[in-house]
Amino acid sequence: MKKTIVLIVIFFLSVCCGSSKKSLTVTFIPSTENVFLHYNESWKTISEINIPFNFSIENHTSQKEQLVRYSYNYGNNMEGHPTRLFIKKNKGYIKLKNSEDIFIEGHKTNSYKTRTKHFIDTTRFGRTFFEPYIKEMQRSNQDSLNVGSILEFKVKHKEFFTNLLKNDSISLLFLDENSETNFRKVVKQVEY
């Protein structure tokens, strides 16, 4: 009888206190939004590309987690502008303020989206690569151009797309009172 009770206690402790399971999971979700190119009139070329990304953060614990900082890390040499984070609420997305507290309730998932602002090195791909887009922008007298979905753009310009997003990642900083720094950093390679 004592042996059975000891085994039951050991089982419950191993299930409840198991450290092998991650408390959070970050998952990229394919975006249906479009990619935009931006024309710089003074440079007479395309200077920036905006690429949409969606991701979710799943909390596997019963405790709520607090996300205190988010950043998009550009892996290419040209880098880019800081990005804004949006959280899904009801059927739409709401832009989060930089200092806003973001909580992920226990055993819940929050969905987010962001839009990168990559600087483009036009010397690497040459003016002829962007020429059709530049002509379209000049013809329509616009400084930005919708070039289709991520999938469409990736299929059409695979090498450019792969080089642009190579080594890109997101960094998420969570409050963690059990760590020395009181924070826990999660870095996830961008998936597209």
Image (cartoon, rainbow, N blue to C red):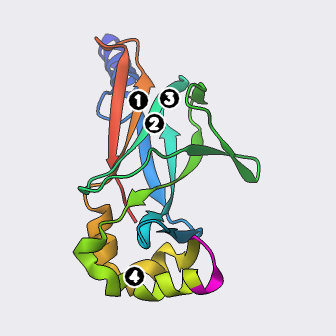
Q: Residue 21: x and y, percent?
A: 34, 36
User: What amino acid is found at the position of numbered circle 4 in the picture?
Assistant: Phe
Give the distance between the C-alpha atoms of the residues marked 3 and 2, in whole angstroms.
Answer: 8 Å
Distance between the alpha carbons at the discs numbered 1 and 4: 37 Å
Residue pointed to by mark 3: 67
Q: Which residue is found at the position 46% from the left and 65% from the top?
A: 42
Residue at disc 3, secondary structure:
strand
Label 3 to label 4: alpha-carbon separation: 39 Å
The residue carrying mark 2 is: 70
| Label 3 neighbour load within 10 Å: few <14, some 14-19, many 20+ | many
Q: Is residue 62 visible?
A: no
**Disc 3 vs disc 2: which is toward the camera?**
2
Task: Out of 30 and 163, give the one closest to the viewer.
Answer: 163
**Closer to the N terminus: mark 2 or mark 4?**
2
Q: Is disc 4 placed on a helix, strand or loop?
A: helix
The answer to whether residue 185 is seen in the rendering is yes
Give the residue at the far right of this rendering: 90
- The amino acid sitting under disc 1 is Leu
Please provide the residue range marked out in magenta: 139-143
Contact flag, marks 2 and 4 (Cβ < 8 Å): no
